[in-house]
Image (spheres, grey):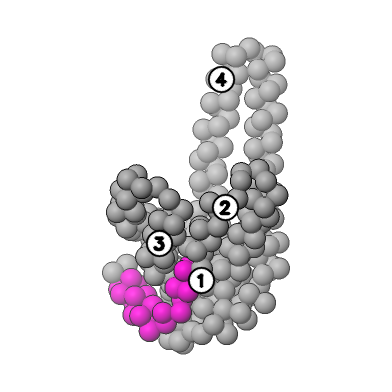
């Protein structure tokens, strides 16, 4: 399906299922309480943890709702809650696997950098660090793109966490250019839609303004989720 038709179909689905934007509305409202917590305080870290948990709930529920909307044309908050109940733990496990996979090469890079500093001095260390960080950066970007459909495999195809990651890598490899175009469209859409928000934020930066901006842009966030899910289902069929 051409990208234009994919967006058109997704927009119609969002129009018929406005509840898909509700989780993003709540996510935007979470920006408000941050102004009341002192950085480094227990309340700050507690709310940070709550935000992470809510983010996982939102992602699980939204992907489940989007999958239901794409496959049947209609999604409800029952689909949201069912998806969260079924996949919350699996999503956490998958996230921990991803985090571990990211930390290992970073830890090795830090150890090598320290060793290079001791053995070669500052100049030699900078050269070694550059040699390490450049391929590591490219590998990180490739990895992020490679696992970008792991959540769809986990929730829509009901795969195990490790299988979701493996199949996402294979899926992205098979559809690489289409996926790059898709992510580029998301990037451009995000940049264009955020320009007014950035301008207003520079004039009057407040958490309330950030929340209002998030509320205004919440349908756009829901739309990109639907587009990604519709793309996944189409390519998988």
Q: Is residue 7 magenta?
A: yes
Residue at mark 2: 36
**Crowd tier of the residue under label 1, counting other residues whose Cα lies within 10 Å: few below 14, some 14–19, many 20 or above:** many
Residue at mark 1: 23
Principal secondary structure, stretch drawn in magenta:
helix
Q: Sequence-wise, which precedes: disc 1 or disc 2?
A: 1
| Residue 25 on image: x %, y % | 47, 69
What whole-number distance in Å separates the C-alpha atoms at marks 3 and 1? 15 Å
Q: Which mark is residue 212?
A: 3
The residue closer to the viewer here, 139 or 216, is 216
Residue at mark 4: 126
Q: How many marks?
A: 4
The stretch of residues the image draws in magenta is: 5-25
The mark closer to the camera, 3 or 4, is 3
Q: Sequence-wise, which precedes: disc 3 or disc 1?
A: 1
Height in image: 214 above or below 8?
above
What whole-number distance in Å separates the C-alpha atoms at marks 3 and 4? 44 Å
| Residue 21 on image: x %, y % | 44, 73
Height in image: 6 above or below 130?
below
What whole-number distance in Å separates the C-alpha atoms at marks 1 and 2? 22 Å
The mark closer to the camera, 4 or 2, is 2
Q: Sequence-wise, which precedes: disc 4 or disc 2?
A: 2
Q: Is mark 2 on a helix, strand or loop?
A: helix
Q: Quadrant of residue 59?
A: bottom right
Q: What element carries label 3?
A: helix
């Amino acid at each position: 399906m051409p990208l234009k038709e994919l967006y058109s179909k997704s927009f119609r689905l969002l129009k018929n299922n406005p509840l898909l934007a509700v989780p993003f509305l709540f996510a935007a409202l979470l920006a408000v309480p941050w102004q009341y917590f002192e950085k480094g305080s227990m309340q700050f870290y507690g709310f940070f943890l709550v935000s992470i948990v809510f983010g996982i709930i939102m992602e699980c529920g939204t992907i489940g709702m989007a999958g239901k909307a794409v496959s049947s044309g209609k999604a409800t908050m029952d689909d949201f809650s069912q998806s969260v109940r079924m996949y919350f733990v699996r999503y956490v496990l998958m996230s921990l696997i991803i985090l571990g996979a990211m930390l290992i090469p970073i830890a090795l890079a830090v150890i090598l950098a320290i060793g290079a500093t001791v053995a070669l001095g500052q100049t030699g260390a900078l050269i070694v660090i550059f040699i390490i960080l450049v391929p590591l950066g490219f590998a990180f970007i490739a990895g992020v793109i490679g696992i970008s459909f792991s959540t769809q495999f986990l929730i829509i195809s009901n795969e195990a966490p490790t299988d979701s990651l493996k199949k996402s890598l294979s899926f992205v490899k098979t559809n690489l250019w289409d996926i790059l175009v898709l992510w580029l469209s998301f990037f451009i859409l995000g940049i264009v839609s955020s320009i007014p928000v950035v301008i207003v934020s520079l004039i009057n930066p407040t958490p309330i303004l950030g929340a209002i901006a998030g509320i205004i842009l919440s349908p756009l966030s829901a739309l990109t989720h639907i587009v990604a899910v519709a793309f996944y289902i189409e390519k998988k069929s």
